[in-house]
Image (cartoon, grey):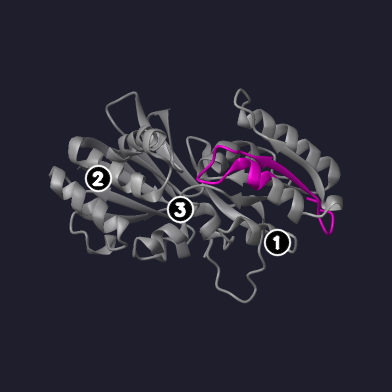
Amino acid sequence: MEVRQPPSFTFVLNKQSGPYDGNEIQALIEQTIPTDRLEALMVLGEEEELCDLVRIALQKAREAGGCLVLAGGDGTINAALPILLEENDVPFSVLPLGTFNFFARSQGIDLDPESALEALLSATPIDVPVATLNGHPFVINISIGVFPRIIDARERHQARFGRNRYVALISGFYTALNSRQDHRLTLIVDGQVHRVRSPMVSAVFNRYQVEALNLDSSCIDQQKMTVLVTRPVSRWGMFGLLLRGATGHLDQAENLETLCASELTIDTRRRSVRVAIDGETQRFATPLKLRVHPQGLHLLAPDRSRSEPVNGAG
């Protein structure tokens, strides 16, 4: 992987991400990045597919010996990840514009767009571990059961009431109180079989989120996923679980089991299940097979030589 020093940047801007004005972000990019280092600024159109635009941008960055920059939220990153993992000869970076920005937080990328752009000018390449679900990469978490319904409801409510954290939280609590169903699942965790009944199972591969939930980070330290298995609970029990998660006290939840896994298989009686993956929902065929790839992505990140690693690698 050859990167010009200093590298040029090819931006893919998703103006629909998060609370920012897309036109203002476009102007900020053009003002902050020197002309000789701004290879291209490509804006995602309403009728355009993000993946198609990312492939075109990757080729431009490759020809320039530069870097691809995704300007958007966690959903934008997740949609581009399969391409980035497949064509990982080009480094990428992120301009965080979403609601939660878990990936950017975990890599020490500033959440203020102007500060993030300024730091990008002196960023350095690092290897970032990535996990996959049935071959589809993710860098934050996946979840089955109640949580995908929470995500779908959140999208409907935010479309109506606006994209912010408060709408997301209220929507989540409301959905938890009105949807609960236990699933009979077979989990194979690094070869060990666990048969469980659970309304929700999650696999987290993001240090920032694990620490924000106040959970033990030893799994992340070992480059493993933190697997969270919710035991059968009442509707109010699920509400309490989500409340502890939202306030960073999930370690106090009595109805939660935690496991570490480099490889995880989740099997159910259904032929396919809806999965929340890095903040978006998709349907996947079962069994669900998850695996950690220690050096999956090449990221251009702020210089963290004076700070502790925050990435999933530890």
Report x, y in % for residue 216. 35, 66
Q: In this view of the protein, can residue 71 be seen by the observer?
A: yes
**Side of 31 where 298 appears, left or right:** left
Q: Residues within 10 Å of mark 2 (few under 14, many from 20)?
A: some
Q: Which residues are magenta?
A: 1-26
Point 26% across, 37% down: residue? 185
Q: Is residue 76 above or below residue 121?
A: above
Q: Disc 1 designates what residue?
A: 118
Question: Could you tell me which residue is drawn at 58 percent across and 74 percent down?
Answer: 307
Q: Which mark is residue 205?
A: 3
**Which secondary structure class fits the magenta region best?**
loop
Q: Give the residue type at disc 1.
A: Glu
Left or right of residue 235: residue 40: right
Q: Nearer the viewer, residue 120 or 199?
A: 120
Say what secondary structure mark 2 lies in. helix
Q: Amino acid at mark 3?
A: Phe
Q: Is residue 253 magenta?
A: no
User: Residue 173's mark?
Assistant: 2
